[in-house]
Amino acid sequence: MRHRPGITSLLLAAILLSAGAHASSTGTPPASPAAKPDKNGCVRGTFRVLLDVGHSAQVPGAMSARGFPEYDFNLRLAQALEKALLRAGFRNTNLLITPGPARAGLFTRVEKANAWPADLVVSVHHDSVPEWFLETWTHDGKPARFSDRFAGHSLFVSFENKEPQASLLFAQLLGRELKIQGLKYTPHYTLPAMDWRRRDLLDPETGVYRYDQLVVLRETKVPTVLFEAGSIINRDEELLMSSPERQTKIATAVTDAVRLFCAARAQ
């Protein structure tokens, strides 16, 4: 397990704030005046959260087991996260939708995040598997691809990001909150069978992986985490990812993690 210096103390400090953060869960009235810090020191009204919707309508990413594009899942979940954060008083939460080609779109996302600038970027995605894991089934009378081998979320950070400690801290906080909600991360990125898509697992407790090369993680100058919310190529998890219950659990976890991260940054 590899950490940047200082990350353990930062995580411990953030966890010590968790009791107060959980006492005001999603669904409570928004924090009052924008410039007023909450009891943990976080000024929610001015803390800038950018929710990056992964992929685009033109380049929609992976296809689900039932033939739906990843972009649709990303957009729906990001919208649910935006609503939850706004309700919790994070009034400077913005949704970033980037149309157009994939490669150009990556640099556009980075430019917008840096120009705002955001205090935190969460890039919202849903997972698939490499080609060699895929099987074929029939859905609605048509052939489709699936893989039920793996399920669960995963979190990625880059140590080439300008704020690697803070990126890792938020990823760990989010992984912890997802665990509190009863959700599990997928360990399959550690398997030799993943080949060139294999990643270093930085924290086996919270499911945080290292992915230095990804443009959105590497080039953004603010704390940035890529969140694979679940596997839509898994037939059971695809259905779960569209359910209001799962989206509520994820939204609660993200909101509580943002609250803790904001408070830790204020300290």
Image (spheres, helix red, strand yellow):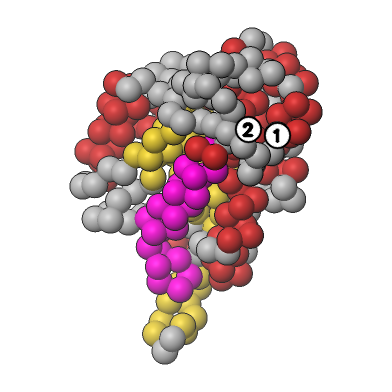
Give me the C-alpha separation between circle 1 and circle 2: 12 Å
The quarter of the image holding the C terminus is top right
Q: Which residue is mark 2?
A: 257
Q: Position of 197 compared to 52: left or right?
A: right
Foreground pick, 99 / 160 = 99
Q: Is residue 222 visible?
A: yes
Is the residue under label 2 in contact with that under label 1 (CB below 8 Å)?
no
Q: Position of residue 128 (x, y in %)?
A: 49, 57
Q: Callout 1: 10 Å neighbours few (<14), some, many (20+)?
A: some
| Residue under the image location 29 percent in, 21 percent down | 115
Residue 150 to residue 4: above or below = below
Q: Position of residue 197 (x, y in %)?
A: 49, 45
| Residue under the image location 26 percent in, 40 percent down | 105
- Find the magenta span and give its range: 62-85
**Label 1 element class:** loop
Q: Amino acid at mark 2?
A: Ala
Residue 128 to residue 65: above or below = above
Foreground pick, 123 / 48 = 48
Label ID, residue 245: none
- Residue 74 falls within the magenta-colored stretch: yes
Q: Position of residue 60 (x, y in %)?
A: 32, 56
Q: Amino acid at mark 1?
A: Ser
Q: Is residue 187 visible?
A: no
Foreground pick, 178 / 22 = 22
Q: Callout 2: 10 Å neighbours few (<14), some, many (20+)?
A: many
Q: Main secondary structure of the magenta part?
A: helix
Residue 138 to residue 39: above or below = below
Q: Which residue is mark 1?
A: 24
Q: Position of residue 238 (x, y in %)?
A: 54, 65
